[in-house]
């Protein structure tokens, strides 16, 4: 929560390892898919459903005999844990392999879908499923670090919107909950109208 209050979704753009993996996969030269806007808007709500149901509601409602809650999302959905933890652990420890069951197969299938989707769609897991991104997004408009638009310099050329891979128009919604604050819009602005600010003070420009 503290990270969210300070940085918002800056973490998604700069610190997330799985986000980096998705970006590298997207760089593979293949025809890219453009999700229809109506479908895209509906799918983007899934990450909030994951946050509400899998991360908050189920752990609150279901506990074991010791009163501890299961990490439902991590156990049953999260492809990140499978890629960065589960698979390496199994590869390095052959004693675990006979114990692999349907849950591991299911989560590997989710990971496979995410990997394949990342080749054709920019950061699909970040856009549609990640509850941590959804949680950080809740603080996007109140975090200390924000994206700022100099309205006097902006000429509404649309360069920033065309550059944004998260399908955000920074000139109109600089602190959209979908913005991961990668800074590509700042680089693309021909008028230096976009910049990062922290607590109201400028911390970054194009040059």
Image (cartoon, grey):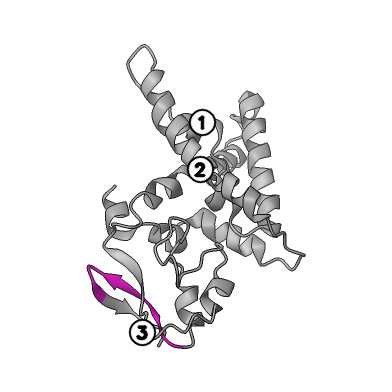
Q: Is residue 131 above or below residue 169?
A: above
Question: Who is closer to the viewer here, 156 or 52?
Answer: 156
Residue tagged by mark 1?
75
Label at residue 147 = none
Residue 200 within the magenta-colored segment of the rendering: yes
Q: Write the residue at 50% across / 43% down.
A: 47
Q: Secondary structure at mark 3?
A: loop
Label at residue 152 = 3
**Mark 2 vs 1, N-terminal side:** 2
Tell which tag, 2 or 1, sits nearer the viewer.
2
Q: Is residue 74 above or below residue 164?
A: above
The image shows residue 6 at horizontal and vertical percentages of 27, 58
Q: Which residues are magenta?
A: 191-201
On screen, residue 108 versus residue 183, left or right, reads right
Q: Is residue 28 above or below residue 16?
A: below
Residue 126 within the magenta-colored segment of the rendering: no
Q: Write the residue at 40% across / 52% down.
A: 137
Which quarter of the figure has residue 21? bottom right
Q: Secondary structure at mark 1?
A: helix
Question: Who is closer to the viewer here, 78 or 133?
Answer: 133
**Mark 1 vs 3, N-terminal side:** 1
The image shows residue 49 at horizontal and vertical percentages of 49, 36
Residue tagged by mark 2?
47
């Amino acid at each position: 929560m503290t990270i969210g209050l300070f940085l918002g979704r800056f973490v998604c753009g700069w610190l997330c390892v799985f986000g980096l993996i998705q970006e590298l996969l997207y760089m593979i030269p293949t025809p890219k898919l453009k999700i229809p806007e109506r479908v895209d808007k509906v799918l983007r709500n899934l990450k909030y459903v994951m946050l509400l149901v899998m991360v908050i509601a189920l752990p609150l409602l279901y506990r074991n005999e010791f009163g501890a809650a299961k990490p439902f999302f991590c156990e049953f959905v999260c492809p990140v844990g499978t890629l960065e933890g589960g698979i390496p652990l199994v590869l390095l420890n052959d004693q675990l392999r006979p114990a692999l069951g349907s849950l591991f197969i299911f989560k590997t299938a989710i990971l496979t879908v995410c990997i394949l989707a990342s080749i054709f769609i920019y950061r699909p897991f970040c856009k549609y499923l990640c509850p941590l991104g959804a949680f950080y997004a809740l603080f996007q408009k109140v975090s200390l670090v924000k994206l700022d638009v100099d309205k006097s310099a902006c000429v509404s050329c649309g360069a920033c919107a065309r550059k944004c891979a998260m399908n955000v128009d920074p000139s109109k919604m600089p602190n959209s909950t979908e913005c991961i604050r990668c800074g590509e819009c700042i680089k693309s602005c021909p008028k230096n109208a976009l910049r990062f600010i922290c607590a109201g003070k400028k911390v970054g420009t194009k040059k």
